[in-house]
Image (cartoon, rainbow, N blue to C red):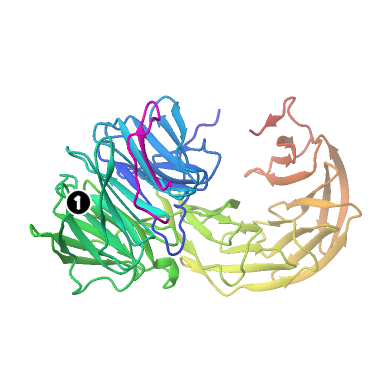
Amino acid sequence: MAKLSETYACAPSTERGRGILISGDSKSNNILYCTARSVIIRNLDNPLQISVYGEHAYPVTVARYSPNGEWIASADVSGTIRIWGTHNDFVLKNEFRVLSGRIDDLQWSLDGMRIVACGDGKGKSFVRAFMWDSGSTVGDFDGHSRRVLSCSFKPTRPFRIVTCGEDFLANFYEGPPFKFSMSIRDHSNFVNCVRFSPDGTKFITVSSDRKGIVYDGKTGNKLGELSSEDGHKGSIYAVSWSPDSKQVVTVSADKSAKIWDILDDGSGKVNKTLACTESGGVEDMLVGCLWQNDFVLTVSLGGTIYLYSAKDLDKSPVSLSGHMKNVTVLTLLNRREKMLLSSSYDGVIIRWIPGMGYSGKFDSKQFGLIKLLLAGKDEVIAAGFDNKVFRVPLQGDNFGPADTVDVGSQPKDVSLALNSPELAIIAIESGIVLLNGSKVVSTINLGFTVSAATISPDGSEAIVGGQDGKLRIYSVSGDTVKEVSVLEKHRGAITAIRYSPDVSMFASADMNREAVVWDRVSKEFPTQTRLIS
């Protein structure tokens, strides 16, 4: 029976011009981030220790642990918050419709009894605080006229809540029950993030006006600002405090993160600037951050998480990333070390190493969107949504210049003769195309609609699957093929065919999620077929 060995996580969902929220639990050293309709739970000490919560009906925007670490509250674009346990298969505790629009941020109170959420809504309903078990409202939150981007709950008594948003305001509320106390009008652009320090004595707001301002946590009075000397040159999207409340990390559209020393008078001075570029483009803008225990995390617009050691910020960060769109292709690259290559429908190709996980991205701009991807020993064959097939040599950790072959029709499948790697077979709707290197040897019309194909490692045999669910086996000789036998077992169109590593068997799968393993010599199959869930 198969047992899950490793999980390679997707990247956080990001949006240009917006900060994203990444949170965590200092006890377990787990972090939470959101992508599509899922919440990803990832351990910083072991990044391959991953769990996924996927019960939301709409894209998830934020998730946070309760103070005791036993519960997680996650919110989505419909305004719904789900509260679920961290153990026992993520059992659902409660579900509340909190706002009429997207929720952008939420925070628990220190005692774990209340949750405040903010975002977009109809009228002036941009913020709401409620009891976590009953959903009953615990205050009125007037004062905002536009979308509220961030909120923060003072972690010590007396409780306070601060919110900020697109109306350039930060509002201060006292309670519970919470009521409006005052508006802070020190920023001249969107106020993107607000956070109380862990000791509750201060809070900080950061804005698209490139400023960070520190306030008294109890009264809301302004204390000081982050210094403009060596400050950010672009919008500041997020901020996070160090566990000792003496420093903060900020991230910006200028592609840098900065560590600031917060002095007793509330002013901030740059201690360290962190810049880690991958593509050199807008994908390197930093849009999220978190300071948890001895780790400082930053998140780029391209979805890469940079993991720094807070004790040694000069040390190169560990990069954690993944796909931001649905994965369409997975293939194994057999070289000195085993490597998995995966491609998503946006054309991103990522390499994964078992036991290590993410190992970087390939530059795939030369062939755009990818539908098919197959790895040989020293090359990759790729095909997109046109008539072209690309044979791409591997040069170190990247691709060399591709040879382009026009096969006359959109490829349905591709297979390499591993012992004769120049020889490849391309399935097209009307038949197959045989390639030798980048040259078309022959295009053969088979007289039925083809959906999948594979070629044996020595190049002497091809198996072609059709829309009719039949498998047809051909002998291959030069530029011709000859039908040897026809196998019938599937009840749906064939989607994949692969030889076993020792070539004694081959497997086929169909649209009905049914897989059949065949003996290559006898053409017999097991009495039971395996259903793929």
Q: Which residue is mark 1?
A: 242
Quadrant of the drawing holding the N terminus: top right
Q: Range of the magenta residues?
A: 125-146
Q: Nearer the viewer, residue 95 or 523?
A: 95
Q: What amino acid is found at the position of numbered circle 1 in the picture?
A: Ser
Give the residue furthest to the right: 447
Query: Residue 98, relative to residue 336: is it above or below?
Result: above
Quadrant of the frame with the C terminus: top right
Q: Main secondary structure of the magenta part?
A: loop
Q: Residue furthest left?
A: 264
State the image coordinates of residue 398 (x, y, percent, origin top left). Answer: 49, 67
- Magenta span includes 347: no
385 or 87: which is nearer to us? 87
Tell me, yes or no, whether the highlighted magenta stretch contains residue 143: yes
Q: Is residue 253 left or right of residue 502?
A: left
Q: Is residue 9 visible?
A: no
> Does 229 sit left or right of 322 as displayed?
left
Report if residue 17 is visible in the image.
yes
- For mark 1, give the secondary structure: loop
